[in-house]
Image: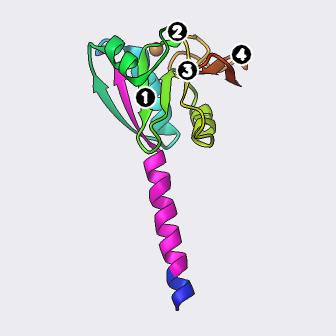
Amino acid sequence: MKSWMAVVFLAATSSFAHAADQAISVYQDPNCGCCAGWVEHMRDAGFDVKTTKTRHMASIKQKLGVPMSLSSCHTGVVEGTGQIIEGHVPASVVHKLLANSSVKGVAAPGMPTNAPGMGELDGNLITVDFSGRQFSRD
Ligand SMILES: [Cu+2]
């Protein structure tokens, strides 16, 4: 009986942790159409995305520690871990980020046309961590 209860408890806590990992707050400019495209991509992949429209993206990025040189149109914060997602980062790369808590954030700098919300992945989309090192290629 006791071990059965322990199993139920573990299952409940791990699914709770999973849900928190999947919650992302996204800040975007009100006029950004491709931002909405990326949010849809993330929701399709099972992430729970909350969006905030704001005209103060530059100060938000600064506050969250996004390097100016890596900035894109929208900025996401993983609620469970505090990790940052800058721009049109594929959902598969966000999973890779979540698996490595030592990485503070990952960016798809600028507005790459071969990224989710912009266009089709072509195998050449490079994302970088916040020190500018390559994190993924898709
Ligand atoms: Cu964009």
Upstream in the sequence, badge 3 or badge 4? 3
Q: Main secondary structure of the magenta part?
A: helix
Q: Which of marks 2 and 4 is in front?
A: 2
Asked whether the residues under the numbered discs 2 and 4 touch, taking CB atoms below 8 Å apart as contact, a structural biologist would say no
Question: Which residue position is annotated with label 1?
Answer: 76
The residue at 47%/9% (across/down) is: 68
Taking the magenta stretch, the answer to whether it contains residue 27 is: yes
| Numbered circle sitting on residue 124 | 4
Q: Nearer the viewer, mark 3 or mark 4?
A: 3
Residue type at the position of mark 3: Ala
How is the model colour-coded? rainbow
Residue type at the position of mark 4: Asn
Q: Distance between the residues labelled 1 and 3?
A: 10 Å
Question: Is 93 rendered above or below residue 15?
Answer: above
Q: Residue 33 vs residue 55: left or right?
A: right
Upstream in the sequence, badge 2 or badge 4? 2
Secondary-structure class at tag 1: strand
Question: Which residue position is annotated with label 2?
Answer: 110
Residue type at the position of mark 1: Gly
Asked whether the residues under the numbered discs 1 and 3 touch, taking CB atoms below 8 Å apart as contact, a structural biologist would say no
Upstream in the sequence, badge 2 or badge 1? 1
